[in-house]
Image: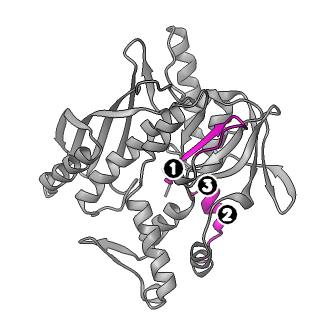
Amino acid sequence: MSSSQEDRLLQWLRGELRKDGSDRIGDDAALLPKAETAITVDHQIAGVHFPTGLDPRVVARRLLAVNLSDLAAMGAVPRYAFLALSSPPDQNVKSFLQALLKACRQADVELAGGDLARSPVLSATLTLVGGKPPRGRWVLRSNGQPGDRLWLGGPVGQSALGRHLLATGAEFQKSRIQLPPDLASDRCLATAARQAIRRHLFPHPQIDLGLWLGRRRRAAAIDISDGLSLDLHRLCRESGVGARLDVEKLPTSRSFLDLCNQLHLKPLDLMLSGGEDYCLLFSLPASIRPPDSYGCSRIGELTRDRSIRQIEGGREGLLEARGWDHLEARS
């Protein structure tokens, strides 16, 4: 399987950790022995993860959401949060903290500590601690087996489309989205554009779906943050399996396709490698299917052959591991 620069660095790090008799890297959160605790950490940096100048209240909500999505992939119950916040002198830190506290209360998470500092740009790092629910199991990337069905917790590609719109003229100011004139004048395209931007700025972590998966006898899952194809490769690598992905079964909408066409973007590229979808990609034994209320789509299956393949128009070929590489140099 091919891998990103980030994956190669992490594989080296895991090798070094194994020399010390430990290796807790490989899932969306680390599991601590005996404590039945999962811990994850993620950050949001201005100009990297969100546009510089974005309302700090939006940044706070997004920071918590992307971390909650990691715990969802483990089947964990969110419990505690620790914040490390660095900001420029003119940043409204209080509004950030107010928004984070509100979001934590809604998610039943206790903000238990952290650190504040000055920096040239807004940079926020959140550590979340989650617990194993009663009668629940940890949902690991390594739990997949050949013959399992592959499922997707929601549509992919829309967040990447929203990110593109924000980078090419759209703005989010004072809870309102301002679109370029050519999009704003078309009601259908404008609606699709606003949906994509909100999907990018306000992810919806699938905690309930993760808890449901944790109550199954066996399930493998990963949070799609870096792109469906790249994260599918990661899940398969941990489970020691391959996969067949039917791209024609990926959930989409007419408005998404029309907006991509208007912007001269390839919908399938966004869906497979756009990233920041923050929905769950998971596998279940063939006899089990998720409740319809979760809105999941069956998109393929895991295979004994370790190759990752995509099916489109009746033709089958290798699926490249493409997506967001955090260590890739960008202009």
| Cα distance in 3D space between marks 1 and 2 | 17 Å
Q: Which mark is residue 260?
A: none
In front: mark 1 or mark 3? 1
The three-letter code of the residue at mark 2 reads Leu
- Residue 136 location (% of width, % of height): 47, 26
Write the residue at 37% across / 33% down. 77
Q: Which mark is residue 268?
A: 2
Q: Residues within 10 Å of mark 3 (few under 14, many from 20)?
A: many
Say left or right for 185 vs 120. Answer: right
Q: Residues within 10 Å of mark 1 (few under 14, many from 20)?
A: many
Which residues make up the magenta segment? 264-290
| Cα distance in 3D space between marks 1 and 3 | 14 Å
User: Secondary structure under badge 1?
Assistant: loop
- Residue 177 location (% of width, % of height): 34, 75
Please report whichever mark, 1 or 2, sits nearer to the chain's N-terminal start.
2
Camera sees residue 185 = yes
Please report whichever mark, 3 or 2, sits nearer to the chain's N-terminal start.
2
Say left or right for 140 vs 308. Answer: left
Say left or right for 149 vs 110. Answer: right
Asked whether the residues under the numbered discs 1 and 3 touch, taking CB atoms below 8 Å apart as contact, a structural biologist would say no
In front: mark 1 or mark 2? 1
Query: Residue beneath label 1, please?
Result: 279
- Quarter-of-image position of residue 110: top left
Residue 275 within the segment the image draws in magenta: yes
| Cα distance in 3D space between marks 3 and 2 | 8 Å
Write the residue at 16% across / 56% down. 91
Quadrant where the N terminus is found in the figure: top right
Asked whether the residues under the numbered discs 1 and 2 touch, taking CB atoms below 8 Å apart as contact, a structural biologist would say no
Query: Residue beneath label 3, please?
Result: 273
